């Protein structure tokens, strides 16, 4: 079982002026809005189609063999 690693978060210094803190939060907000979760599952769809075709072929072979045997 793979080990789980905790993500390190950036800590804002409490001594920083309020102007810098708001600038950092605005910058981090723009970074998070730029990185939207957009998964690409095209390889999964290809694999599922391949599995379906193979299952159909094997069922066809089983049906043909049941008539022959």
Image: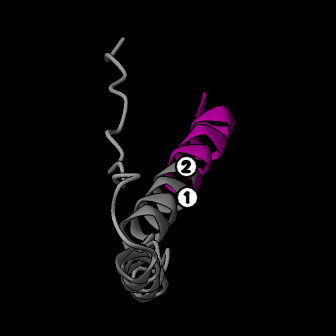
Assign the magenta stretch its main secondary structure. helix
Q: Which residue is mark 1?
A: 52
Helix, strand or loop status at disc 2: helix
The residue shown at (36%, 67%) is 43
The outermost residue toward the top is 1
The residue shown at (42%, 88%) is 30
Neighbourhood count class around disc 1 (C-alpha, 10 Å): few under 14, some 14–19, many 20 upward: few
Q: Vertically, is 4 above or below 50?
A: above
Of 2 and 4, the residue lying toward us: 4
The residue shown at (58%, 56%) is 56
Q: Say if mark 1 contacts mark 2, CB within 8 Å.
A: yes
The residue shown at (44%, 62%) is 44
Estimate the x, y position of residue 9 in percent, counting from the top left: 36, 46
Q: Please indicate whether residue 38 sits to the left or right of residue 27 in the image.
A: right
In the image, which residues are magenta? 56-69
Estimate the x, y position of residue 55 in percent, counting from the top left: 55, 49
Estimate the x, y position of residue 58 in percent, counting from the top left: 52, 45
Of 60 and 14, the residue lying toward us: 14
Q: Which residue is mark 2?
A: 55
């Amino acid at each position: 079982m793979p080990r789980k690693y905790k993500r390190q978060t950036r800590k804002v210094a409490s001594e920083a002026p309020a102007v810098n803190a708001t600038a950092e939060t605005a910058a981090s907000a723009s970074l998070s809005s730029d990185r939207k979760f957009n998964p690409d599952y095209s390889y999964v769809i290809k694999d599922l189609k391949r599995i379906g075709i193979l299952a159909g072929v094997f069922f066809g072979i089983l049906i043909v063999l049941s008539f022959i045997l």
